[in-house]
Image (cartoon, rainbow, N blue to C red):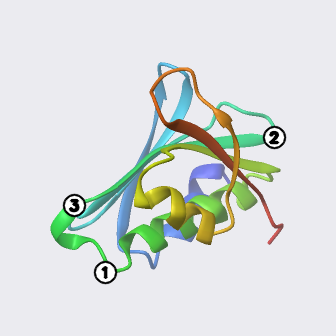
Amino acid sequence: MKLSDKIKDILKYSNCTYHFRKGRYGEELLIMSNNGAAFMRILLNGFTSIELEGLSVMEECQRQGYGTLFATLFERIGSLLRMKTLYLTVDRTSWVYDWYTHLGYKEKCATERVLHEVWMFKKVDDE
């Protein structure tokens, strides 16, 4: 089974669409809810890790489960790809930091790109 077929199988019941593309930092997987309420971009350029480059939910659609769905998809894709670690960056002063902490992510270190931005990581559980 091809990788795209495995990803398609994960997304089958999530009401999302996706596509792969070659991006600036390697291969990327872009996923959007079919109604356009949520979007995420995953960088697939690591051998043992992947990075959530962005997860966005429209303000009027927040608190409807989209963030949780997309965070779960990110973790399932990491497991499917046999990654050991998931990475993302977040503003340490935002509520999103606490949300990712609640989901089991741990702070790794500050980035040098933006004030208050930190790297967070989570070890992948095998499916």
Q: Is residue 97 left or right of residue 14?
A: right
Q: What element carries label 2?
A: loop
In the rendered image, which quarter is residue 26 located in? top right
Measure how far apart labels 3 and 1 are at the Cα level: 10 Å
Say what amino acid the circle numbered 2 marks.
Answer: Thr
Secondary structure of residue under mark 3: loop
Numbered tag placed on residue 64 in the rendering: 1
**Occupied quadrant, residue 118:** top right
In this view, the mark in front (3 or 2): 3
Which numbered disc flags the more N-terminal residue, 3 or 2?
Answer: 2
Residue 8 can be seen in this image: no
Measured as percent of width and height from the top left, residue 86 is found at 69, 50
Measured as percent of width and height from the top left, residue 54 is found at 43, 45
User: Which one is earlier in the sequence, the residue at label 3 or at label 1?
Assistant: 3
Q: Give above or below for 62 relative to 45.
A: below
Residue 58: mark: 3
Report the residue at 81% width, 67% height from top: 125
Label 2: few (<14), some or many (≥20) within 10 Å? few
Q: Whole-Å distance between the Cαs marked 3 and 2? A: 31 Å
Residue 106 as seen in the image, left or right of residue 33: right
Q: In which quarter of the image is residue 10?
A: bottom right
Q: Which is more toward the observer, 1 or 37?
A: 37
Classed neighbour count for the residue bearing mark 3: other residues with Cα under 10 Å, few (<14), some (14–19), many (≥20): few
From the image, tell me which residue sits under label 2: 48
Res. 2 visible in picture: yes
| Identity, as a three-letter code, of the amino acid under mark 3 | Met
Which corner quadrant holds the N terminus? Answer: bottom right
Query: Residue drawn at (50%, 36%), measured in percent from left and top?
Result: 117
